[in-house]
Image: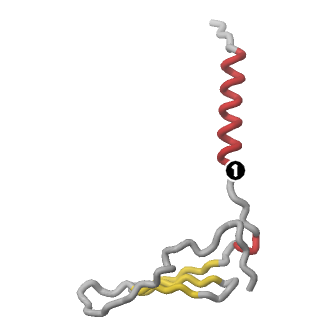
Amino acid sequence: MVRSIDMKSALIGGFVVAMILFLVGAVDYVPPDDHGRFKIEANDGHAFILDSATGQVWSEMFPDPLSSIVVVPDPNFYAPKTHPHVTTEP
């Protein structure tokens, strides 16, 4: 049994595969200095984020629901810490 391959379909399929590969590879560049810049530590009731480039620390406390402790949350804890195109000098 002999099957022929339609050349137009093969070209369209190849183009679609190439576009998928290009789109998957299109990510923002992060300088190597920013790798490992943020350190995250957490335990039962606290979480800390440390920016090792600037020394800034964000903290959040998660009190026991049965406790009467009132905690004011840090409004910047869940906010983005840096933009990929913005560099901060220490």
Element under disc 1: loop
Q: Residue at x 69, y 50 (%)?
A: 26
Q: Which residue is mark 1?
A: 26
Up/down of 58 relative to 78, above or below: below
**In the rendering, at what x and y percent does residue 9 appear?**
66, 19
Image label count: 1
Kindly identify the residue that appears in the image at 60 percent across and 80 percent down: 39
User: Is 11 placed left or right of 77 in the picture?
Assistant: right
Residue that sits furthest to the top in the current view: 1
Position of residue 59 measured from the top left corner of the image (x, y, whole percent): 49, 86
Seen from the viewer's position, the closer of residues 32 and 90 is 90
**Which residue ends up furthest to the left in the rendered image?**
66
Compare residues 54 and 42 and report the one nearer the observer.
54
Q: Locate residue 38: give its quadrant.
A: bottom right
Question: Could you say which quadrant of the image residue 55 lies in?
Answer: bottom right
Amino acid residing under circle 1: Ala
The 10 Å Cα crowd at callout 1, few under 14, some 14 to 19, many 20 or more, is few
Outermost bottom residue: 69
Q: Where on the picture, by quarter, is residue 29? A: bottom right
- The reply to whether residue 52 is in sight is yes
Quarter of the image with the N terminus is top right
Residue at position x 70%, y 29% in the image = 14
Task: State the scheme by which the image is colored.
Answer: secondary structure
- Residue 54 located left or right of residue 74: right
What residue appears at the point 68 percent right and 24 percent down from the top-left corner?
12
Residue 78 vs residue 12: left or right?
Answer: left
| Coordinates of residue 34 in the picture (x, y in percent) | 71, 73
**Quarter of the image with the C terminus in it:** bottom right
Q: 63 or 42, which lies in front?
A: 63
- Compared across the picture, whether 49 is left or right of 4 comes to left
Residue 43 visible in image = no
